[in-house]
Amino acid sequence: MTSSTGRPEELAANLDAVRRRIDTACADAGREPGAVRLVVVTKFFPASDVRLLAGLGVTDVGENRHQEAEAKAAECADLGLRWHFIGGLQSNKAAAVASYADVVESLDRAKLVAPLARGAEQRSHEVDVLLQVSLDPPDRAGRAGADPDDVPDLAAAVEAADPLRLRGLMAVAPLGEDPRPAFARLAAIHHDLLVEHPAATWLSAGMSGDLEQAIHAGATHVRVGSAVLGSRPQFK
Ligand SMILES: *Cc1c(COP(=O)(O)O)cnc(C)c1O
């Protein structure tokens, strides 16, 4: 990017490149163009960027911190975007998250089901839910997501909560490894889930660095941040 290029042009060019990567990966994997939905992860970037992205045809945005997400969703309420919450959920914040999130991708324990359902009910709005599954070894520090063995019970708990719609699974590939074996494990877990819950067809996997591998493994949603918005400011 030259310094004379403004933010709108930069976002448009980056978005174009990411859309081309998605289309190419779909073609390479023998999947329909349009089989994969792009969720642009706008965390750490201002609402003004969200507004520019909406103008470029982005329909889905992802955020991972409650306060930031809540403020941005309120500021961008006129844009008709679908808000995906993709971060760690605290049970005392879950009801509040359900008040603006259209999709909660990071449900990883049964304790979150009741507060999420309460928040959705207060808003008289169904919330789409993905179960976040950990693809890390059980002893990995900072592991996020449910153990794959816990998925059937979690799925049943979400299914039993009326204002929540079980849509599928979300995962992040383990850091610093070839993502392909991890995404293959995820696809197998998803296959098992679909036997019991045939409507849970969404598979959210793949980020800026590994969206091609995720699309090959069957991802229906990719969550792309830095490839569209640039590198995030470093925190602590
Ligand atoms: C930040 C984040 C992303 C986007 O990551 P990039 O590498 O910037 O594309 C995707 N998924 C989750 C859960 C995230 O927290």
Image (tube, rainbow, N blue to C red):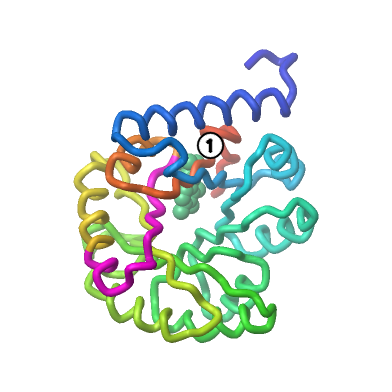
Q: Residue furthest front?
A: 32
Front-lying residue, 180 or 198? 198
Mark 1, ligand 1, within 8 Å: the answer is yes
Check disc 1 and report the residue beneath it.
Answer: 226
- Rate crowding at label 1 as few (under 14), some (14 to 19) or many (20 or more) other CA atoms within 10 Å: some
Tell me residue 214's x, y (percent): 33, 43
Give the image quarter of residue 179. Answer: top left
Left or right: residue 6 compared with residue 173: right
User: What span is colored magenta in the figure?
Assistant: 192-207
With 196 as the anchor, is 104 left or right in this view? Answer: right
Please, is residue 200 above or below residue 156 in the view? above
Is 194 colored magenta in this rendering? yes
Q: Is residue 71 left or right of residue 190?
A: right
At 23% from the left and 42% from the top, the residue drawn is: 180
Q: Could you say where residue 106 lies in the image, as x and y percent from the top left? A: 45, 65
Kind of element beneath mark 1 = helix
